[in-house]
Image (cartoon, grey):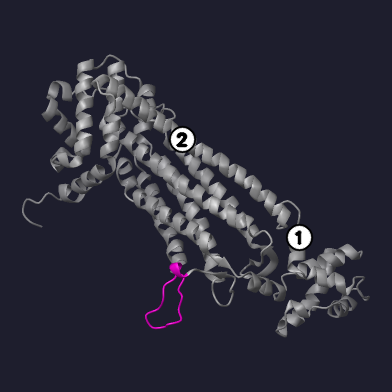
Amino acid sequence: MSAGENVFFKYLLEPQIAGQAEKFFDLMLKADDAHALMLLEEGILREDEARQLLNFSRQLSAQGVDAIELTPEKEDLYLNIEAHLIDTLGDYVGGKLHTGRSRNDLYATIQRIKCRDMVLDAADDMLDLRRVLLRIAEENTETIIPGYTHMQPAQPITFGYYLAALGHAFERDFERLAAAYARTNLNPLGACALAGTGFPIDRTLVGSYLGFDGNLENALDAVASRDYVADIVFAMTMLLSDIGRINQDFYFWVTSEFSILKLPDEFVVGSSIMPQKRNPIIFEHTMGKLSCLLGAFVSVITAMKGVPYTHSRATSGEVFTTLWGAFDETRAAVKCMSAVLEKIEIDKENALRNTNKNFSTATEVADEIVRKMDVSFRTAYQIVKKSVLPLYRQGKTSEALTLEELNHAAMEVLQRPLEITAEDVERALSPLGNVKKRTVLGGPAPETVSKDLEEMRLRLQGHARQVQDWRGKIESSENTRKDKIARIIGKAEI
């Protein structure tokens, strides 16, 4: 270390100021404008003072952050901007902007605005993903695929039914993000350092200029709380967990052993040595991104753990260290998932072939015995099991299951043959017949799935309107703030 090197400046303040300049410069000027307007309306600033402050903000916004020489001696972005403001307008006017607020509530405010905007972008991405998923599901309500439990063939389902299940998961992911948005979009400005101010400010007014839905009622809570960040990261972590699970399925289904799905060339890479390779690395990357979100979630919680409930650099600074990257990783995963769903191909013939031969229709055979005979399901289960296991051990498929095999087992269990026909067995072994019989709530029958998808589409439309309303309110507040500034500085528009 060279003599005189300031480690605090080099490793903490300089990186912090650079990050603030990149992410918060424009938002800080917006918060300044909203605060100045409120101070004017409450009679704390004169109109000529407000005009000078608002003009300064407009000019600095046009020039950009590079117009200021950012130095760590001034601690952070705000004090660098304020120093430039006072150099430009003088202390009497420039020094008045900070009346009735603190850096504590100012940074809490712009952090919430930044998070709010990124949550809205994530919500839009989620809506797009759900639109694609519903469309592909609607096209595949009769496309038979094997359903698995424990990675073993279980019962026949359809690709549309499988995607509908993910559609419900993505709905819950959206609702978690929406709940996080509601807790994020609350105004801290005017809370000052932790105890409010003796000036007659109007926190609701300043919040309305910034598009907030309400206030954080307690000033100490306003500067201390960053739990909304954990809400956001948790919502995104669950989303990437669900995306990871569908990618895990697809990862298996594109293998030659399953051959259920075909992945377009744009999503695969080759090998440096094996010319035949088509490596589905898009799934590997997307599944791996969950680790970034889990890391961010742990970082956020850990940064808040044991910190006194007041303003702290641990909560106002370190909580956000991994957050911005978490947003980027979430966007990448959601965009990739949408693209895969748009373009992946299902090998319908092979999927049906697999379902026909893997004994996944055996449960329906047992059900048919129960329907036609006065026996319990457990008894029917034992008959079918005794018929299937020898065939399975001989390497045969469900196509080898005949009435003769079943009657042989029935004689062991019931001491009498079954009262069903060969046609009953054939129908029970039909994968599509299996699916079509399951019309109960939550079943894979095409009409049941179609109804479910229709209801999901209606909820999707409602969620889209919700996001549109949020964006509309923010845009309206932006227009109101700009119109008032324009009238004060005497310009038609800014």
**Can residue 199 be seen at all in this image of the molecule?**
no
Please give the name of the residue rendered at 92% of the width and 64% of the height, measured from the top-left corner: 374
Please give the name of the residue rendered at 16% of the width and 21% of the height, measured from the top-left corner: 93
The residue lying furthest to the bottom in this view is: 394
Left or right: 227 with respect to 131? Answer: left
The residue lying furthest to the front in this view is: 492
Q: Quadrant of the C terminus?
A: top left
Q: Across the whole image, how many numbered discs are drawn on residues?
A: 2
Do labels 2 and 1 touch, CB within 8 Å?
no
Q: Label 1 belongs to which residue? A: 436
Q: Label 2 belongs to which residue? A: 470
Is 332 a magenta residue?
no
x and y percent of residue 475 in the render?
Answer: 40, 32
Numbered range of the magenta stretch: 265-280
Q: CA distance from mark 2 to mark 1?
A: 42 Å
Left or right: 88 with respect to 107? Answer: left
Q: As shown in the figure, which amino acid type bears the numbered disc 1?
A: Lys
Q: Secondary structure at mark 1?
A: helix
Q: Quick one: label 2, few (<14), some, or many (20+) residues within 10 Å?
A: many
Of the image marks 2 and 1, the number of the one nearer the N terminus = 1
x and y percent of residue 60 in the render?
Answer: 20, 34
Please give the name of the residue rendered at 59% of the width and 74% of the height, measured from the top-left corner: 258
Give the vertical position of 260 relative to 18 (above or below).
Answer: below
